[in-house]
Image: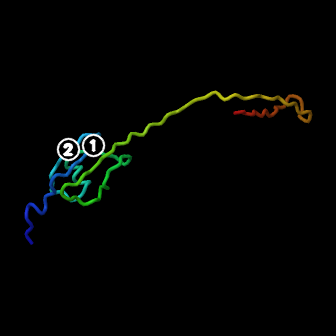
Amino acid sequence: MLVGYGALKKEQISIVVKGEEKHISTFKETVREALDEAKITYDKDGKIIPSLDTKLVDYMDIKVTKVKKLTQNEYENIPFEVKLVEDKNLEKGNNIDIFVSIFT
């Protein structure tokens, strides 16, 4: 079966990454293939609409949102009180257990 050039080529695919729009025409079949052909990088944390396996159609809009995950550590002094309780049942010279209560 012979299919015409126009039937295979997807026209005016719009790809938006970081607010910048790029228009492409391609013979590729899926969003993933079109992004790869356009040399647009993405990772598993990013969001791509429509999904990577979606079949391309003329005048399709593709939006790629890149996500950067950060970890933030916070340190905070927590007030506490130490209470020493003598235990007359312990032999002299043995260690005693100290319990710390934290009040928030």
The residue positioned 32% from the left and 50% from the top of the image is 48
Q: Horizontal and vertical percent for residue 24?
A: 16, 49
User: Label 2 is placed on what type of residue?
Assistant: Lys
Q: Residue at 31%, 52% (x, y): give it.
A: 49
**Horizontally, is 6 left or right of 87 in the view?**
left
Q: Nearer the viewer, residue 91 or 45?
A: 45
> Which amino acid type is marked by label 1?
Val
Q: Residue at x 25, y 55 (%)?
A: 31
* Label 1 vs 2, first from the N-terminus: 1
Residue pointed to by mark 2: 22
Q: Up-down: is 41 above or below 26?
A: above
Quickly name the residue at label 1: 17
Q: Are marks 1 and 2 in contact (CB under 8 Å)?
A: yes
Q: Residue at x 82, y 29 (%)?
A: 84
Coordinates of residue 38 in the picture (x, y in percent) = 20, 47
Q: Position of residue 1 (x, y in %)?
A: 9, 72
Point out residue 42 in the picture as x, y percentages from the top left corner.
Answer: 31, 46
> Up-down: is 58 above or below 18?
below
| CA distance separating discs 1 and 2 | 8 Å
